[in-house]
């Protein structure tokens, strides 16, 4: 599970880097990535998965608006 979550986090981090800088969505996405990273470091896998899933949904809804 850890390997899957790490791949998910890396993929989402790459998407976050493509967001326009200095926007609220970019800031919120960066916070979510940091939170997920801390959860992964602490081996809190369920919390990391929930955070990454929330970020995925946030990015998907933002892409739909664009």
Image (cartoon, rainbow, N blue to C red):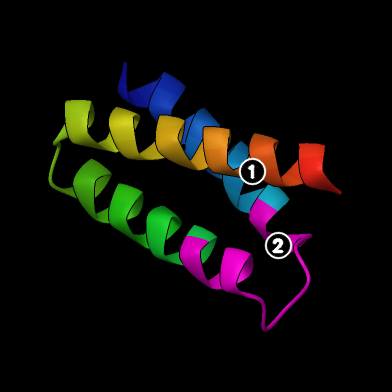
Tell me if residue 23 comes above or below residue 64 in the rendering: below
Where, quadrant-wise, is the N terminus in this rendering?
top left
What residue do we see at 40% from left, 65% from top? 31
Q: Residues within 10 Å of mark 1 (few under 14, many from 20)?
A: some
Q: Residues within 10 Å of mark 2 (few under 14, many from 20)?
A: few
Tell me if residue 66 comes above or below residue 60 in the rendering: below
Image position of 38 (left or right of 11): left
Of mark 2 and mark 1, the one earlier in the sequence is 2
Mark 2 vs mark 1: give the one in front.
1
Tell me if residue 16 comes above or below residue 5 in the rendering: below
What residue do we see at 64% from left, 43% from top? 59
Q: Which mark is residue 40?
A: none
Looking at the rendering, the stretch of residues picked out in magenta corresponds to 16-28
Residue 11 coordinates in the image, percent (x, y): 63, 38
Q: Which residue is mark 2?
A: 17
Q: What kind of element bears circle 1?
A: helix
Do callouts 2 and 1 mark residues in contact (Cβ within 8 Å)? no
Q: How many numbered marks have been drawn onto this rendered protein structure?
A: 2
Residue 22 coordinates in the image, percent (x, y): 67, 84
Residue 38 coordinates in the image, percent (x, y): 24, 55
Residue 18 lies in magenta, yes or no? yes
Q: Outermost residue, bottom direction? A: 22
Q: What kind of element bears circle 2?
A: helix
Q: Which mark is residue 59?
A: 1
Which of the 4 image quarters holds residue 56? Answer: top right
Q: Outermost residue, top direction? A: 1
What residue do we see at 44% from left, 55% from top? 33
| Nearest the eye: 41 or 56 | 56
| Nearest the eye: 56 or 64 | 64
């Amino acid at each position: 599970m850890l390997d899957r979550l790490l791949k998910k986090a890396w993929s989402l981090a790459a998407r976050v880097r493509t967001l326009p800088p200095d926007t609220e969505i970019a800031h919120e996405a960066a916070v979510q990535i940091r939170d997920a990273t801390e959860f992964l470091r602490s081996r809190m896998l369920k919390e990391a998965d929930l955070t990454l899933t929330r970020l995925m949904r946030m990015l998907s809804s933002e892409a739909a608006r664009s």
